[in-house]
Image (cartoon, rainbow, N blue to C red):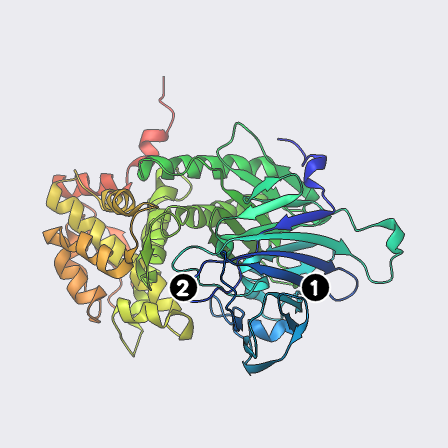
Amino acid sequence: MSKVSASFCAAVVTLIFAAISAPIFPQDVNAAIDIDTAQTATAHVRGKFSFPDGVRSRRNFSFLRSIAGIDSLAGRVSDLNLYDANNKPIAFRKLVDGEYLSEADMVGFSYKVDISVPKQRDAAAHTSWIAGRTGILMLADLLPQVTSGGEPPRASITVSFVETGKDPSLGPGLWPVVSTESRRDETFTSSDTRDAVLYVGTGWDKGFAIDRASPVQVIISGDWNFEPDDAVSMAGEIYNSYQKLFRGGSDAKPLIGIAKFPQQTAHGQWQAETRGRSVTILSSDMPFRTQSLQRLHEQLRHELFHLWIPNGVALTGNYDWFYEGFALYQSLKLAVGLNRIRFEDFLDTLSRAHTIDSAQFQRTSLVQASTNRFKGSNTQVYARGMLVAFLCDLALLNQSKGRRSVEDVLAELFGKHRKPATPVDGNTAVLALLRSNPGVVPIVEKYVSGSEKIDWTSEIATAGIEDSDAGILTSLRVKEKPTGRQKALLDKLGYNNWRKLAPTSK
């Protein structure tokens, strides 16, 4: 493990903006971002569109308005100016927050973005902000929106850090900038600005773990009840486990940024997002080291899964029920497999999810719930999605006599639709794959395409599991005397994993 080298501490970082393009022609943007870090953090953005030869038509200008249930993002933008090819101002009118229409073809632009700490705590894992000497810049909400004839938006930008009132002769502030984006000299280039994340500021100096021998890179801000080496070791183990599950993946190292919430937050709270190859975890710490390590392992298990699904596949649309629900379930199985949790904990988590799902009054299909995920259906997407993954696993294991499991489905989906495959609708691809397994079809029809209440008595019985609570709370447990077939399925779920890892007595 080593500290970030001086090359990371550039005063000016050049990024690549992907501007809003005309509906047909691809465009790049060359722009500069000046971050005013004094008192309130403000990003001053100025730049120009780069059009193909002979193309100069562009009149629509827009910004990202919402992401992950965080609304009013475009309301942070102010002092917008648009310019023609001769750098002369162009008149425009505002349609709504974040949507503008110019009166002539535009080439240049300038504006400000408020990147102070968001009022909504969970927004810190999904949007740009700077607090003190620690910040996260996400180009998706800093740059104009773009559609480039189906191509990913690309960009080229310089970022400077300045303090209002500081003597200009002293030059810009020297802040570290770490990212997965390509870099040449002082320029970061992004082939898809929707995925571009930059971790900026000296506040990340608490732990830079960029180890060539590790399959991951980790940067940490703040003091925690774990050490940076703990995070690197955990992340590497989990990443390698998923590499094995998915039978490969990208050779590019993911970058994991772990920081405290910029707002005061009680123990045990966390929010995260995996964007491209960047994993951002915002969290409060736990009171004790063992709890802190356990929580970190849980966060990493879930988020690293997303490097493969959905980030590594060319699937589109709202199939959140699958990539969130199956991520939760696979995270649980991996935790049992790595002896991070007991099998009783595995069953307890499934029990709580079933209790939550059973209490839903307005039931919709998982496909429909995914389209309304951030409008009241988030809990259903996670809880029911995980239960469906568990039921699919049981059905696959039972049908194949233990030779096939949900891991095989995940690997097949990734292998078939791994980028740069032709994009297809996520729900169509996932449902077709699940329905190709006869034992899974009833589960899909009742609980994914349909909205029936989950009654899993017969399904869990195949693995020697029963609900010991006759009331409204679900409490799963293993039967006292499971049959040989049930023991075999339990073993595939990880019931006896602790025995395999226990030291042999002499």
In the rendered image, residue 218, in percent from the top left (x then y), is placed at 57, 41
Between residues 379 and 304, which one lies in front from this camera angle? Answer: 304
* Residue in view at x 53 percent, y 62 percent: 19
Quadrant where the N terminus is found in the figure: top right
Q: How many neighbours does mark 2 have within 10 angstroms: few (below 14), some (14-19), or many (20 or more)?
A: few
Residue with the mark numbered 2:
24
Instruction: Give the vertical position of 433 relative to 24 (above or below).
Output: above
Residue 438 is at least partly visible in this image? yes
Residue 262 is at least partly visible in this image? no
Q: Which numbered disc, 1 or 2, marks the residue closer to the eye?
A: 2
* Residue in view at x 61 percent, y 61 percent: 48
Instruction: Give the vertical position of 90 relative to 346 (above or below).
Output: below
**Number of numbered discs overlaid on the protein picture:** 2
Between residues 309 and 408, which one lies in front from this camera angle? Answer: 309
- Residue 44 is marked as 1
* Residue kind at label 2, given as amino acid type: Ile
Give residue 476's quadrant in the image.
Answer: bottom left
* Residue in view at x 76 percent, y 46 percent: 174
* Residue kind at label 1, given as amino acid type: His
- Residue 173 is marked as none
In the rendered image, residue 93, in percent from the top left (x then y), is placed at 58, 82
In the displayed structure image, the side of residue 235 where residue 117 appears, left or right: right
Instruction: Give the vertical position of 40 relative to 392 (above or below).
Output: below
In the displayed structure image, the side of residue 119 where residue 196 appears, left or right: left
Q: Are marks 1 and 2 in contact (CB under 8 Å)?
A: no
Quadrant where the C terminus is found in the figure: top left
The kind of secondary structure element at disc 1 is strand
In the rendered image, residue 505, in percent from the top left (x then y), is placed at 36, 21
The kind of secondary structure element at disc 2 is loop
Between residues 53 and 447, which one lies in front from this camera angle? Answer: 53
